[in-house]
Amino acid sequence: MALFEQLNLNKLSAVEQEIYRFIVNHLEKIPYMRVRDIADDAHVSSTSVFRFIQKVGFQSFPEFRFYIKNHLEKAHFDAHPEHLGLEARIKGLNMQIFHPDAEYQIRKLAEAMRDADLILFMGMGASGAIAQYVARKLASLGYFSISIDELTYPIKSFLRKDQKNVLVFLSVSGETKELIEVITGLDNQAIVQKYCITSNRESTLARLCDYSIEYAIKEERKDIFLDLTSQLPSVAILETLIGYLQDYRSNP
């Protein structure tokens, strides 16, 4: 990416070439320098620096510094196109990535949880951390809500036949082997309502659950086994769910 696209280097004077070389070799410093600093380090006069800045198309030194700063930021972004800033991530979290009936789906899950005797969240890795987060918030609202990320734990001891049990499984892929084993290992699945939040509506987990809430997200992995996929859609769903359940507590 050219720094000064309209600049003809062959038409620069010897002094202007010295200023130009100093600027391109010290771009990172320019946004924090004064005219005098550039003049001293390039061994030219401040007047010569001003004339150069005007020659390349700027009316003032602050305008020139602002241009250099933006140039550096764009160059960094072009060199690292995979990086998303805060604004880009927020913009990416729009309703198009959710099911058209997402609000209805979340409300239906909230209604199931409202009168539950036990709400159990389960997940692994990052999903397990989020499961712990949402379970804690619901417990703070007065619900009997817990999370388990040790998926070999004998959860059957929690699931009594005389109570309403709601299990919520969190999995980006919907193919987490340990979660699938938990569901298939339940002796009497009739005493449990099973929900999952996943990005894959065709997954094994979604098929085994009574109800699923899906979202669309590009899966990201490092070294195959390390899941780096964004959890923002899942968190948005769960925060909305918490909002409904908080309303039920406030307006029984």
Image (tube, helix red, strand yellow):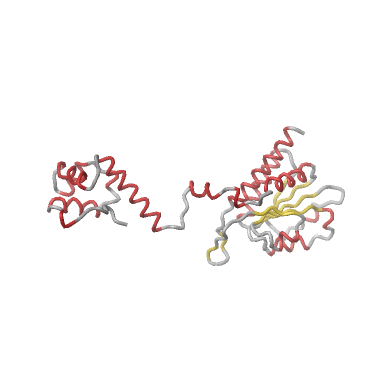
Image coordinates for residue 230, horizontal then vertical, percent: 56, 54
Placement of the N terminus among the 4 image quadrants: bottom left
Q: Residue furthest bottom?
A: 224
171 or 78: nearer the viewer:
78
Image coordinates for residue 119, horizontal then vertical, percent: 75, 47
Q: Residue furthest left?
A: 14
Q: Residue at x 18, y 48 (%)?
A: 41
Q: Residue at x 48, y 46 (%)?
A: 87
Image coordinates for residue 197, horizontal then vertical, percent: 68, 53
Q: Residue at x 27, y 44 (%)?
A: 64
Image coordinates for residue 120, horizontal then vertical, percent: 73, 50
From the viewer's perspective, tell me whether residue 44 is left or right of residue 167: left
From the viewer's perspective, tell me whether residue 242 is left or right of residue 11: right
From the viewer's perspective, tell me whether residue 221 is left or right of residue 169: left
5 or 121: nearer the viewer:
5
Q: Residue furthest top?
A: 251
Q: Quadrant of residue 50?
A: top left
Placement of the C terminus among the 4 image quadrants: top right
From the viewer's perspective, tell me whether residue 184 is left or right of residue 11: right
Q: Residue at x 23, y 51 (%)?
A: 23
